[in-house]
Amino acid sequence: MFEKYLKLTAYDAVFLLEATGTSLWITLVSISIGTVIGVVMGILRNSRNKLVSAIPLIYIEPLRNSPLITQLFLVYYGLPVVSGIVLDSNTAAIITLSLNTGAFFSVLMHNSIKAIPGAQWEAGLALGHSRLSVFINFIVPQVMRLLVPQAITLYINQLQCSSFVSLIGLIDLTKAGNILNLRTMRPFLIWTIMFAIYFIISYPLSQLAKKLEQKVAFSY
Amino acid sequence: MPMIEVKNIRKSFGSNTVFDDFSVNFDQSGVTVILGPSGTGKSTLLRCINGLETIDAGDILVDSLSVKEKRNLREIRLACGMVFQQTTLFPHLDVLENLVISPVKIQKMDRKEAVDKARALLDKVGLGGREHSKHNELSGGEQQRIAIARAMMMNPRALLLDEITSALDPEMTAEVLRILEKLAGDGVVMLAVTHEISFAQRVADRVIFLEKGNLVADASVDDFFSGIKSNNERIARFLQNISQG
């Protein structure tokens, strides 16, 4: 009975592999762009100039406080109406996920910099370093050790959130699962496979984050 | 000519004025202990000298360089090494790197030379062989001794010591004070904010007493602990309170 139920064609396997590639591609590109945005915004948030530190909030707060799916629909369906620019689903997905990742990453960056005691800055300055030199030599390495495990957790979350792109017509892993399910009418098999693929990608990353977290557990 | 000239400075934090028209000079040699009740401006004075706090008016000159000019700060900070009350070792670096990184990056010292110098200084502070320890493997006293060695790596002409034993237990305090005595014996100029009266009596050449941002006493250590102490009721009370813990 199970043998029949577990039967999938080679075409299905290739189809799933391609869809996995799409999910990974969209996630990788958007977390890369989002990380760059997040680093810049996170550093601006830590500016001693109150106006400069407030500016990123205009970008961060709306994206942190609205569902990703509404952001995606706004970019894909809403933006062409007001701007006349029609984005293909791939571009819309990457723009939305990048901006969303950037908003969350900038909060992580801001909090990680803030977590470094002011005494570390002063110790570096008192040794004759410039503020830039203190930042590069002493603050960034400490920020990285706090930031990296949290960033990995964010990336895993973004991989899972990338499944929303199936709603604007992209054939990612979730969309492929839906198509295969409709074709084969084997929901348990198909969604177990989907579950397993997401898990196989995410689990090692979450373990890596856990290990890094233990490694960076230093006190001041 | 004094090494450090504090000239008519004013310094406020919001509505709290710490110094108003305060002046004092520090010579090119000797150990000066700065005493006074909490919140009286002792630490603020050291931080202003090092440029970690800006002054509202007046000026501070270190080797005739004004702390008000940003371009002078590096030279001033290299001339006046500073050790803080709280531990400030860089936690991502081991002991050796804590000592070596700044002379290599700032003074462009050859790395091998810096490592040799760091090892010699670690021996001096009684921590030879601990080069590869991380800060959380060290006691508070050991961390402060390394912080002293780290400041000495930059060849400062003076050490500014901001209550560096106040967070330590008596045994660790004794360890740190022994190192300071050794350095004072080597002729290192020190400005030390401390409540360690026995250290002041043994090592200091000069004692200044601050209260509410004013210089209440400025005397040689002998004069301070004999004459002024008995003639000034406020100082006598302060010293009595300290000795009672």
Image: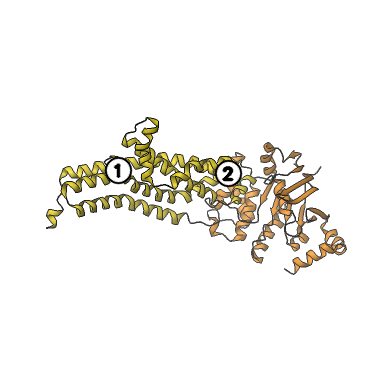
Chain colours: A yellow, B orange
Q: Residue at x 40, y 49 (%)?
A: A154
Q: Dot 1 corresponds to which residue?
A: A167
Q: Any mark on residue B75, and which?
A: none
Q: How many marks?
A: 2
Residue A127: image quadrant is top right
Indicate the chain on which mark 1 is placed: A
Residue A192 shows in the view: yes
On what subunit does the disc labeled 2 rest? Answer: A
For mark 2, give the secondary structure.
helix
Asked if residue A136 shows in the view, the reply is no
Q: What residue type is disc 1 on?
A: Leu
Amino acid type indicated by mark 2:
Val
Q: Is residue A171 above or below residue B160?
A: above
Is B137 situated left or right of A78 in this image? Answer: right
- Distance CA(mark 2)–CA(mark 1): 46 Å
Query: Residue under circle 2?
Result: A134
Q: Nearer the viewer, residue A66 or B238?
A: A66
Where residue B233 sits: x, y (%)? Answer: 85, 64
Q: Position of residue A192 (x, y in %)?
A: 23, 54
Q: Are marks 2 and 1 on the same chain?
A: yes
Q: Quadrant of the C terminus of chain A?
A: bottom right
Query: Is A45 displayed left or right of A176 in the figure?
Result: right
In the picture, residue B193 is in which quadrant?
bottom right
Which sits in the foreground, B81 or A62? A62
Left or right: residue B228 compared with residue A84: right
